[in-house]
């Protein structure tokens, strides 16, 4: 199995659906938005801003023909955010940060208006992955089954430690007062076949039900 490709670090922001429509340049809000970055302070005087991606490799931002932006409001459901469509006209690394600009962002004053806003991209605009490579967003809610056919639970989040990506798997069984939790490294020693096209999505693992993190 090929090396897993981590695409996001802030797993709590992986999949956010935007079901409300927003009239912005006659565009309808995509229903599969994934929040991928936050806008920082203005950069320079020509409408550029610093951008803080939630991934070490911001492929989605680079690949997308349009971004969706909205003010970040703590505790607000992303489906209720006031999404606006913008067309990126520049996105590049600069020193140890990323900077970008969009069509119509002409000066620093205009760019400063978007400080703190979030950037989302339609899942359909994510670059195609190689075989046996997966976006974190696609692994969330997958059912994890061990070598004995025991369903350990579903993937609720993923994170990176110093060595590899780790899946946080939570049991869906109601037999116990507290759900069982497993921290399973996403490496070939533990993870076998991954099927994100099936319903439910499934991940086969070699893992003892009595094993602990």
Image: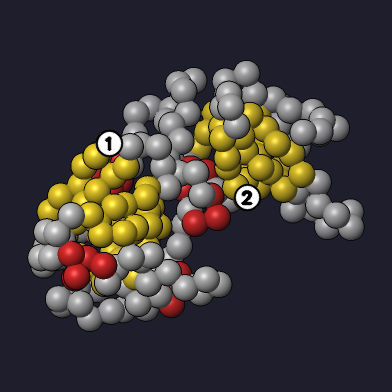
Query: Extreme front residue here?
Result: 45
Where disc 2 sits, the SS reads: strand
In the image shown, does 196 or 164 lie closer to the viewer?
Answer: 164
Q: Where, quadrant-wise, is the C terminus in this rendering?
A: top right
Q: Which residue is drawn at 11% across and 59% down?
A: 46
If you read the primary sequence from the N terminus, does the residue marked by circle 2 or circle 1 appear first? 1
Side of 156 relative to 53 (left or right): right
Circle 1 SS class? loop
Q: Determine crowd level at label 2: few under 14, some 14-19, many 20+ residues with C-alpha closer than 10 A.
A: some
The relative height of residue 123 versus residue 118 in the rendered view (above or below) is above
Query: How many numbered tags mark residues here?
Result: 2
- 142 with respect to 45 (left or right): right
Percent across and percent down for residue 181 are: 76, 44
Q: Where does the image place residue 47, in percent across and percent down from the top left? A: 15, 61
Residue hosting label 1: 95
Residue pointed to by mark 2: 156
From the viewer's perspective, is the residue at label 2 or at label 1 nearer?
Answer: 1
Give the alpha-carbon distance from disc 2 to disc 1, as whole Å.
Answer: 34 Å
Q: Is residue 88 visible?
A: no
Q: Residue at x 19, y 70 (%)?
A: 109
Image position, residue 78 (x, y; %): 45, 70
Asked if residue 144 lies left or right of residue 16, the reply is: right
**On screen, residue 211 above or below 49:** above
Q: In this view, does 18 lie above or below 154?
A: below
């Amino acid at each position: 199995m090929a090396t897993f490709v981590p695409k996001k670090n802030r797993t709590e922001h992986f999949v956010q659906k935007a079901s409300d429509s927003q009239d912005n340049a006659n565009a309808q809000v995509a229903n599969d938005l994934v929040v991928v970055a936050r806008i920082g302070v203005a950069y320079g005087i020509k409408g550029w801003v610093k951008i803080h991606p939630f991934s070490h490799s911001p492929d989605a931002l680079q690949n997308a023909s349009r971004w969706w932006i909205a003010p970040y409001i703590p505790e607000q459901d992303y489906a209720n955010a006031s999404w606006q469509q913008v067309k990126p006209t520049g996105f590049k690394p600069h020193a140890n940060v990323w900077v970008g600009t969009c069509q119509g962002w002409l000066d620093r004053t205009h760019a400063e208006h978007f400080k703190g806003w979030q950037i989302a991209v339609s899942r359909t605009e994510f670059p195609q992955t190689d075989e046996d490579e997966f976006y974190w967003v696609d692994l969330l809610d997958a059912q994890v089954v061990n070598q004995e056919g025991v369903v350990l639970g579903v993937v609720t989040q993923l994170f990176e430690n110093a060595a590899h990506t780790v899946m946080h798997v939570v049991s869906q069984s109601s037999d116990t007062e507290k759900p069982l939790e497993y921290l399973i490294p996403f490496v070939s020693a533990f993870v076998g076949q991954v099927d994100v096209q099936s319903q439910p999505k499934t991940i086969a693992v070699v893992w003892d039900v009595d094993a602990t993190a």
